[in-house]
Image: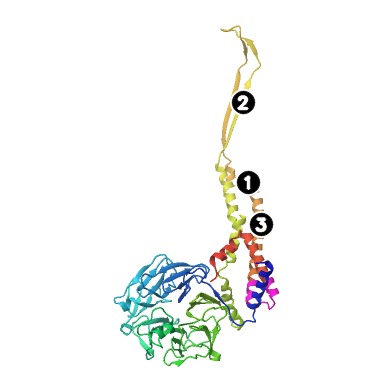
Amino acid sequence: MSPLRTTALFLLSLSLSSPASSQPLWEPVSYGLDDSRLHLVAVDPQVPRTLYAASLRAVYRSDDGGRHWSQRFRTSGHAEVMFLAVDPFDGPHALVATTRGLYATADDGRHWLRAFRGGTSEEARCHVVFFHPFRRGEVWLGTAGGGFVSRDGGRSWQSAGPELSRRSIRYLAIDPTPPHRLYVLTDHEVFAGGTDEATWQSLFSLAATPQPLEEAAEQADEAVVDETASADQLTALAVDPALKDGVSPSSPTTLYLSSLNGAYTSADGGVTWQPLTQLGLGTASIRHLILHHHSPTVLYAATPNGVARLLPEEQRWEALYAGLPTKAARFLAATDSRLFAATDQGLYMLDLTMEQLAQGNWPGAKALLGDFVHEPSIGAVQENAIHYAEVQPEKIAAWRKQARMSALIPKFTVTGDTNLTDFRHWDSGANPDALQKGERDIDWSTNVTWELGDFIYSDDQTNIDVRSKLMVELRDSILDDVTRSYFERRRLQVELITDPPTEPKAQLAKELRIQELTAILDGLTGGWFSSEIERNGRR
């Protein structure tokens, strides 16, 4: 492709992504995956750039925000992956629920062990697994034959209570505010209870509406459909806590409930329920929904028609379709600034930062700067620049130590002298006819000395003082260049988010300046800056 055509396409992309477009743009983040039909996605709560995605047969992991993937788990026989969860206290620990038991890894998915088998075929069919976000080691498991709880990270299990026994449990959710009430979804009923005592209260119930298996399969878009499949099976529940900005802690919790035939909401913690609007969805079937408190429209839903967000003031849903080549969205997950959707054509990511700013919903400086968490900190860049230029303070200290230690090394002196006289005479001894020359005198000596005064001060210290002064000046100059380049680059990045230029030419100038500053930082760190960004990836 010619440089002129490349530039034209780049300018066109800038104009298409300008603020004139009100739709945020989905980006594919599943290149290289063996499977494109994904139905699950999870984010490591401790390391948001670590992602898990699952098809019916395999689980994949990415450590760089979706740029590169590797398969970490694959089912055997006819088993299928039903759910996956990452330990919020221990990232390498993850659980995968399958139709033939629960599997656990403690080393980022390199090795797996079966953590739960179940006593019956129904109990072996694991639908959902959930780590308690506030209690280390507490895990909740929902199966086709009841609920179970583990207090030791999944090593041992016990029944979650008689109310849940022999019930098909589909989903689990928790209230993030104390006392952390747990919500359990069966096929057609919602239970709530404390995690300390296994007593449960029914909050919501729907009469099952049977339907043919073929219709249920088409609506749910799953490879395996239960014989008890119905048109109004419950799918997910989202908890909007009472304790949040501008809301009294005594206010009741708001709940959002989804099913294959509509959605419901409760503003009083589940005492009463009202149907949630379907306007704008184009379907009554909602496969999954989540709340995102950093987003201006906090409720997102995955449906057979794609991903939609709820506009509460307008009492309607808005479809988020830009950049999404498919309508079949199955599951959602989110970080502070990104939304991920598992679809039948791969995994897609939506950057919510521009949407927040466009609607005047500023996430705050901390959240905004958190969008650059994949980039090295200023301290790390300064440290690498100093070591690359070999002007670290430790080098001066090493010089001074070596100068003092040199006093322990003795100085060896070896001298020698030869004296040959010019006196000649006739031998008066046994050989009177021989002419003799004077005797040869050879003198030599060896001296060993220690300059013990060098322990206190030596002439080398003067040279070190001169060199250290020059090194400090060079280091200060490097740190100044790094600091100026780093924060000018960061200011330009923030400006492109908070106040993007309306003219493509102005935006291109800022983008080129960012690339120039990146090259400067690479030059000061020997290429470490860009390689570190590439290694970390985007969250």
Image x and y of residue 343, in percent: 49, 77
Q: In this rendered view, identify the residue nearer to me: 237 or 321.
A: 321
Residue 417's disc is 2
How many neighbours does mark 1 have within 10 angstroms: few (below 14), some (14-19), or many (20 or more)?
some
Residue 87's disc is none
Q: Which residues are magenta?
A: 491-509
Image x and y of residue 155, in percent: 34, 70
Q: Quadrant of the N terminus?
A: bottom right
Gap in angstroms between the C-alphas marked 2 and 1: 33 Å
Q: Amino acid at mark 3?
A: Leu
Does residue 497 show up magenta in the picture?
yes
Q: Where is residue 139, by image quadrant?
A: bottom left
Most extreme residue toward the left is 119
Residue 34 visible to an observer of this rendering: yes
In the picture, measured across the screen, residue 430 lies left or right of residue 115, that is: right
Residue 484 visible to an observer of this rendering: no
Labelled pair 3, 2 in contact (Cβ < 8 Å): no
Gap in angstroms between the C-alphas marked 3 and 1: 21 Å
Q: Residue at x 36, y 75 (%)?
A: 99
Does residue 399 show up magenta in the picture?
no
Residue 460's disc is 1
Does dot 3 land on a helix, a strand or a loop?
Answer: helix
Q: Amino acid at mark 1?
A: Asp
Mark found first going from the N terminus, 3 or 2: 2
Q: Mark 3 against mark 2, which lies toward the viewer? A: 3
In the picture, measured across the screen, residue 166 lies left or right of residue 463, that is: left
Q: In this rendered view, identify the residue nearer to me: 503 or 6.
A: 6
